[in-house]
Image: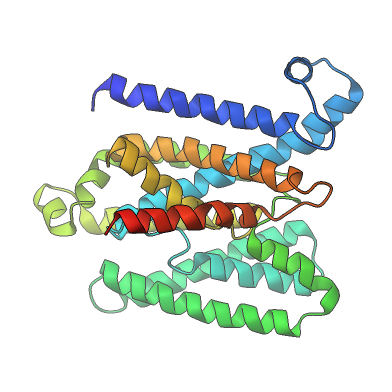
Amino acid sequence: MPAVRATLPLAMLALFGALAMAVSLAIGSVAISPPELWLVLTGGGSELHQELVLSLRAPRALSAFATGALLAMAGALMQVLLRNPLADPYVLGISGGAAVGALLAMLLGAGMALVSGSAFVGAMVSTVLVFGLSHGRGSWTTTRLLLTGVVIAAGWGAVITFILAMSPAERLPGMLYWLMGDLSYARSPEIAWLVLVPALLLMLPIARSLNVLARGPMQAAALGVSVRPLSWGVYGLASLLTGVAVTTAGSVGFVGLIVPHMLRLALGNDQRLILPASALAGGAFLTLADTLARSMMAPVQLPVGVITALLGVPTFLYLLYRSR
């Protein structure tokens, strides 16, 4: 892969991500001009602007960027693993397990820290269930993995419906917002970034092997790739990325489906370029979507999942139409 071919789109996406972060920090109930924003970021500015940017908007924007990057990278990995360009991070029921854990914590009146922890535990439980049941005593195949994930996701959906039906009315709005994806309470982006950066650094050395795996397991094995360990590693890493993203922002849809697929249409299918590009584009996309969600109907804040769905559904239908 020529260096210029990789550097130029990544540089443009990095610039786009920086602009998305700047827009998110500047737009809100109190607008902040670019010179004022620069003063705040360099340690100056008024106390009001420092409080708005550094204490309120920056943690939310960083959480949105990290969540979008995690979901987009997880989607790119799942599309390679399942060899399906329309696979997404939630296809194997990980979000369903996280939702059950989070809703149970909300039902018990737990704080947001325990809700996030319960969501992560639920995501990992779902991962273990899908992986264990799809492997069984026979050989591990992508078809078996996909079917097991669909069944587990349907089971989690039934449990979610039961929990919502049994929940008191005063707790339902918070539960529904979480299910739609919400960054209102995302004030601790550190964990998401601590997972995002090492995961990206870990994926880049194996990107060449992922290119071969995308052509099929038999061809990959013939070319010297250890298919089973690589597949297990990809599934485990994608599950971890999805679990952390869902823990941070709830079930935000379409980011992991649309972003990697559109990048493949524009940049090709080289994972050495697609993986970092997905992180940058996914982060910028969700940051802008969250900015729109909290400012479009201010002072009312919409769940960011509503915005991603409104943007993702027509995009998905267009891609589906093109694939005919």
Which residue appears at 60% of the width and 81% of the height? 159
Q: Position of residue 283 (x, y in %)?
A: 54, 40
Asked which quadrant contains residue 37, the reply is: top right
Q: As drawn, which residue projects farthest toward the left?
A: 222
- Residue 259 seen in this snapshot: yes
How many badges with numbers are in the image?
Answer: 0
Q: Is residue 300 above or below residue 177?
A: above
Q: Is residue 179 above or below residue 237?
A: below
Q: Is residue 34 left or right of residue 264?
A: right
Which residue appears at 63% of the width and 58% of the height? 250
Q: Position of residue 196 (x, y in %)?
A: 52, 41
Its colouring scheme is: rainbow
Quadrant of the rendering where the N terminus is positioned? top left
Quadrant of the rendering where the C terminus is positioned? bottom left
Q: Nearer the viewer, residue 91 or 137?
A: 91
- Residue 233 seen in this snapshot: no
Q: As drawn, which residue projects farthest toward the right?
A: 47
Q: Nearer the viewer, residue 142 or 231?
A: 142
Q: Position of residue 174 (x, y in %)?
A: 77, 65
Which residue appears at 62% of the width and 52% of the height? 307
Q: Is residue 199 above or below residue 322?
A: above
Which residue appears at 72% of the width and 31% of the height? 25
Q: Position of residue 166 (x, y in %)?
A: 75, 85
